[in-house]
Amino acid sequence: MGNPPPPPQIAILGAGIFVRTQYIPRLSEISNLFVLKSIWSRSEESAKGAVEVARKHFSGVEGKWGDKGLDDIIQDQSIIAVAVVLAGQTQVDISLKLLKAGKHVLQGDLSFQIS
């Protein structure tokens, strides 16, 4: 038997209060299933704030912001899925870009049960 494949790498787009207080803690409950590689926000301050929260559970997570940060995530072949936690039309526009780039896109809240 060979070595198991490495866990998939994901990114989160959005770094607001919901991501910091709800999304990241819920993801931490299943942190053995994936690597959280990046958190993106439009602003540097918001991205860095969410990364600070996430590092308690995901030590290697990095912050990305602005157009360049979004492009970095879209072009990063190691990131296979992106959780889009943004409001309204922005969510739709960015999700379409991600899908066109071949990313798996997750939208909505994390109101699942861990059993």
Image: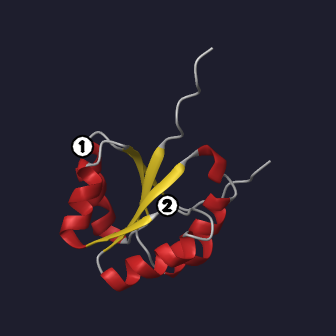
Is residue 44 rendered to the left or right of residue 24? Answer: left
- Observer-nearest of 96 and 21: 21
Q: On screen, 60 above or below 7?
A: below
Please report the residue visible at 25 percent of the width from the left and 65 percent of the height from the top. Answer: 69
User: Up-down: is 65 above or below 12?
Assistant: below
Which quadrant does the N terminus fall into? top right
Q: Is residue 14 visible?
A: yes
Place of residue 59 in the rendered image (x, y in percent of width and height, measured from the top left): 55, 63
Q: Residue furthest front?
A: 2
The label nearer to you, 1 versus 2, is 2
Residue drawn at (46%, 47%) of the image: 9
Q: Nearer the viewer, residue 94 or 35?
A: 35
Q: Nearer the viewer, residue 35 or 115?
A: 35
Residue at mark 2: 60
Q: Amino acid at mark 2?
A: Gly
Kindly identify the residue that appears in the image at 68 percent across and 54 percent down: 112
Residue 93 in sight here: no
Q: Under tag 1, what secondary structure?
A: loop
Residue position marked by numbered label 1 in the rendering:
101
Tell me which numbered mark, 1 or 2, is placed earlier along the sequence.
2
Residue 52 located left or right of residue 77: right
Instruction: Determine the residue positioned at 56% across, 47% down.
Output: 34
